[in-house]
């Protein structure tokens, strides 16, 4: 699937469904949601930065963490969303390098401290689905005009 096709709202809807299905295993849901957010961030960098194509292509020199900082500095990601996505990135990295990784209620509380309005309960109550879908939605909204324009021009 081409990058422009991945921006289609139908793909967004399907990603949300997959995150919901995978939420029984929080690590799978986390990796899936982060992968889609990383795609959205890359498209924003590519479209809004003068050297965006080079930055996205050279992920070693401009990793996801750097792309988040750049978009925050440009004002395309609010400070709260930047902190939330950066913490999600840290958890995704921990998940990728820790066998049998599990999100904890303490991780969820950290997101609450970072400004995500979470329903009361535990991870088992579905808060992980709500959290990940909320972060995907906020990221989409941060760049919606870019994504829609790119789809129209595709």
Image (cartoon, helix red, strand yellow):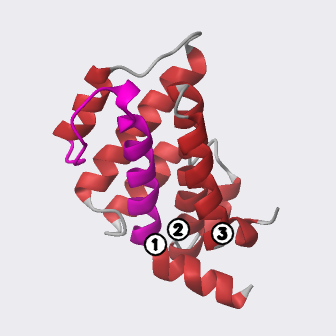
Q: Residue furthest bottom?
A: 153
22, 58: nearer the viewer: 22
Name the residue carrying label 3. Answer: 10
Q: Nearer the viewer, mark 2 or mark 1?
A: 1
25, 67: nearer the viewer: 25
For label 1, count other residues whose C-alpha is less than 10 Å away and answer few (under 14), some (14-19) or many (20+).
Answer: some
For label 2, count other residues whose C-alpha is less than 10 Å away and answer few (under 14), some (14-19) or many (20+).
Answer: many
The numbered disc on residue 38 is: none
- Distance from the alpha carbon under mark 2 to that under mark 1: 7 Å
Bounds of the magenta segment: 114-143
Q: Choose top left, top right, bottom left or bottom right for residue 33.
A: top right
User: Which of the marked residues, 2 or 1, is nearer the chain's N terminus?
Assistant: 2
Query: Which residue does the image show at 61% across and 72% down from the upper left?
Result: 9
Find residue 114 and report its horizontal and vertical position in percent: 21, 42
User: Which of the marked residues, 2 or 3, is nearer the chain's N terminus?
Assistant: 3
User: Which of the marked residues, 3 or 1, is nearer the chain's N terminus?
Assistant: 3
Query: Which residue does the image show at 64% across and 57% down from the upper left?
Result: 14
Say whether residue 31 is magenta.
no
Find residue 96 and report its horizontal and vertical position in percent: 59, 23
Find residue 93 and report its horizontal and vertical position in percent: 52, 27
Q: Nearer the viewer, mark 3 or mark 1?
A: 3
The numbered disc on residue 143 is: 1
Secondary element under disc 2, as helix, strand or loop, is helix
- Vertical placement of 80 versus 77: above or below? above
Find residue 19 and report its horizontal and vertical position in percent: 56, 43
Q: Choose top left, top right, bottom left or bottom right for residue 77.
A: bottom left
- Distance from the alpha carbon under mark 2 to that under mark 3: 19 Å
Name the residue carrying label 2. Answer: 44
Report the side of 142 relative to 45 (left or right). Answer: left
What secondary structure characterizes most of the magenta part? helix
Q: Are marks 2 and 1 in contact (CB under 8 Å)?
A: yes
């Amino acid at each position: 699937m081409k990058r422009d096709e991945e921006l289609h709202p139908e793909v967004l809807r399907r990603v949300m469904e997959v995150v919901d299905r995978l939420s029984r295993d929080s690590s799978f849901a986390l990796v899936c949601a982060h992968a889609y957010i990383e795609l959205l961030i890359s498209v924003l960098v590519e479209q809004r930065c003068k050297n965006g194509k080079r930055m996205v292509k050279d992920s070693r020199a401009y990793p996801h963490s750097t792309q988040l900082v750049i978009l925050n500095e440009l004002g395309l990601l609010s400070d709260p969303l930047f902190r939330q996505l950066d913490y999600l990135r840290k958890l995704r990295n921990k998940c990728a390098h820790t066998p049998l990784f599990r999100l904890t209620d303490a991780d969820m509380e950290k997101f609450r401290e970072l400004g995500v309005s979470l329903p009361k309960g535990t991870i088992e109550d579905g808060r992980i689905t709500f959290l990940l879908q909320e972060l995907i939605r906020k990221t989409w909204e941060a760049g919606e005009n870019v994504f829609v324009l790119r789809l129209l021009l595709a």
